[in-house]
Image (tube, grey):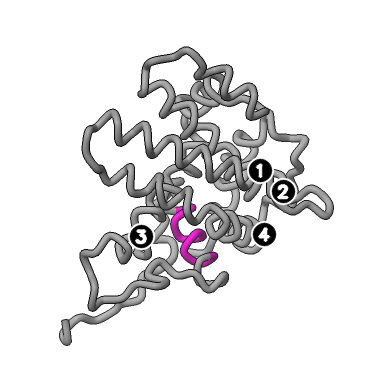
Amino acid sequence: MDNFQYCAVPFKAIVKDTFFNFFMVRWLLAREEAGMESDHGFVPQIKGLRMNDMAFDEDVNVYISGLLSGATKSAVFHQRLARYVRGTELGVHKLVDDVRDRAFKFMVYRTNADHILLRLGVFDHFRENFTGTFADITRGKRYYAFAAGYLGEINGRRSALQDVIEKMSVRFDDYYEILSTMTRKYIEFMQQLTASDEAGIYRGVKRAIKQMRQAEPD
């Protein structure tokens, strides 16, 4: 470890013209800005214990960067929204009532939780005087918790994805705060968009990212 050296990598090389890396770089900047780095609370002396794993967030970084990337370029993401997302808690419960398929329930709760996180941290953030409501945040935490529970039942054992989903539930407030910071400070074009644009907002985000990359110096 003593021989390990950091080296500066040009920003253009980091993003590599991929949406995933575009969002990963800005997410990590926002984590630092918010004072919640990826190893916030990590204690090397107890590495391996579950309570410590919950404090080490590299897996969450990958999950959220993938979520943002998928939201801007994946048709599958929008198909999931159309199939699973409901605007009220009653609507979500009606969708899973009398359904025995645990995989279906997992997808319903996970997709609704993802949608709430993005809506609060990215889109609704630019409504005048908006702050995430307690009810919205509580629903997001609860949906992720339900999703993690059903995933555990499906697999019959713990999995890496279940760990991530549980973290999303436990620390939903933190990730909402980081996402809001990222949107406000590190994704400049979002100030030009409003919540009323949500139906076509992902296409606008995709175009704006391309324009920003083209404007970046080599």
Disc on the earlier residue, 3 or 4: 3
- Count all numbered tags in the image, as a single digit: 4
The reply to whether the magenta stretch includes residue 24 is yes
In the picture of the structure, the residue carrying the numbered disc 4 is: 184
Using the numbered discs, state the Cα–Cα distance from disc 2 to disc 4 in whole angstroms.
18 Å
Label 2 environment density (alpha carbons within 10 Å; few <14, some 14–19, many ≥20): few
Amino acid type of the residue tagged 1 in the rendering: Asp
User: Is 101 or 63 nearer to us in this picture?
Assistant: 101
Disc on the earlier residue, 2 or 4: 2
In the picture of the structure, the residue carrying the numbered disc 1 is: 136
| Residue 54 - label | 3
Amino acid type of the residue tagged 4 in the rendering: Arg
In the image, what residue occupies the spot 66% across and 36% down? Answer: 201
Whether the residues at callouts 3 and 1 have beta carbons within 8 Å, the answer is no
User: Does residue 80 appear to the left or right of 186 in the view shown?
Assistant: left
User: Is 184 or 50 nearer to us in this picture?
Assistant: 50
Query: What stretch of residues is rendered in magenta?
Result: 22-30
Whether the residues at callouts 3 and 4 have beta carbons within 8 Å, the answer is no
Depicted 93 relative to depicted 63: above or below = above
Amino acid type of the residue tagged 3 in the rendering: Met
The quadrant the N terminus occupies is: bottom left
Using the numbered discs, state the Cα–Cα distance from disc 2 to disc 1 in whole angstroms.
5 Å
Depicted 151 relative to depicted 23: above or below = above
In the picture of the structure, the residue carrying the numbered disc 2 is: 133
